[in-house]
Image (spheres, rainbow, N blue to C red):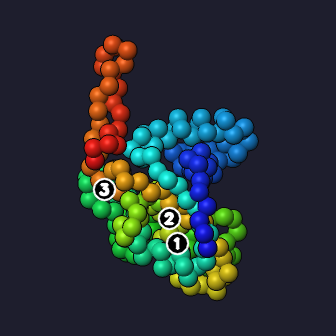
């Protein structure tokens, strides 16, 4: 199945629908698109500023294909911020903090009992090729599907996987990022921009 190319605004909408950055999904869904995007970018500024410009693609896959893909996925941890690769989903399922595991277990039980009742989407980052993929959104969903295994209620389910590919460094992927100081119309202290040309 061929992938579909996405604009960054479509990816931001996914973050909004999932309530990322502490967003109120119900309130956000009632707003015009322009307002939604403005709020998402404002609330997600500290996260988005460390995400380089990417080529975004989306693909819908079945359970078996998804479980194969998950083997290459990593979850962001505190160590990711310290220039270390994230934790593989399978390892995280055994060592994540108990609060996260309880949440993933509840979601896994729901998947097993009721199947997929609303779209399940994952957003990831990679440098492409044989590089691993880091989950930007969907940690608990990935853990839950790993815990649910090949439950009969999921065999016909479809899942949306969105991947951003960039050769530039991404902090969440464990890369070192450089920031360049730029003067702001001669005013101190100026501002810093991500150096994407000299990784």
Q: Is residue 91 visible?
A: yes
* Foreground tag (2 vs 3): 3
Q: CA distance from mark 2 to mark 3?
A: 20 Å
Return the x and y of residue 78 as percentages of the image width and height: 31, 55
Of the numbered discs 2 and 3, the one sitting upstream in the chain is: 2
Return the x and y of residue 21 as percentages of the image width and height: 51, 45
Say which residue label 3 marks. 174
Disc 3 secondary structure class? loop
Q: CA distance from mark 3 to mark 1?
A: 24 Å
Tell me the crowding category of disc 1: few under 14, some 14 to 19, or many 20 or more residues within 10 angstroms, Cα based: many
Residue 144 is marked as 1
Return the x and y of residue 52 as percentages of the image width and height: 41, 46
Q: Is residue 113 above or below residue 127?
A: below
Residue 58 placement: quadrant: bottom right
Of the numbered discs 3 and 1, the one sitting upstream in the chain is: 1
Disc 1 secondary structure class? helix
Say which residue label 2 marks. 140
Residue visible at 49% across and 53% down in the picture: 55
Residue visible at 59% across and 53% down in the picture: 6
Is the Cβ of the residue at disc 2 closer than 8 Å to that at disc 1?
Answer: yes
* Foreground tag (3 vs 1): 3
The residue lying toward the viewer, choosing from 162 and 19, is 162
């Amino acid at each position: 199945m061929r992938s579909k190319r996405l604009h960054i605004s479509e990816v931001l909408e996914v973050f909004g629908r999932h309530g990322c950055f502490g967003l109120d999904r119900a309130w956000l869904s009632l707003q015009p698109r322009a307002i939604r995007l403005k709020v998402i970018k404002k609330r997600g500024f500290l996260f988005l500023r460390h995400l380089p410009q990417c080529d975004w693609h989306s693909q819908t896959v079945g359970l078996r294909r998804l479980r194969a893909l998950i083997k290459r996925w990593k979850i962001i941890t505190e160590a990711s911020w310290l220039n270390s690769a994230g934790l593989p989903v399978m390892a995280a399922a055994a060592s994540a903090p108990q609060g996260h595991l309880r949440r993933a277990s509840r979601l896994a039980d729901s998947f097993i009992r009721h199947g997929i009742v609303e779209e399940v989407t994952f957003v990831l980052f990679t440098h492409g090729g044989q590089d691993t993929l880091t989950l930007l959104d969907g940690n608990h969903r990935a853990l839950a599907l790993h815990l649910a295994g090949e439950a009969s209620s999921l065999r016909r389910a479809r899942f949306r996987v969105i991947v951003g590919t960039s050769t530039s460094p991404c902090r969440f992927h464990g890369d070192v990022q450089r920031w360049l100081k730029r003067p702001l119309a001669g005013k101190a202290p100026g501002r810093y921009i991500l150096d994407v040309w000299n990784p």
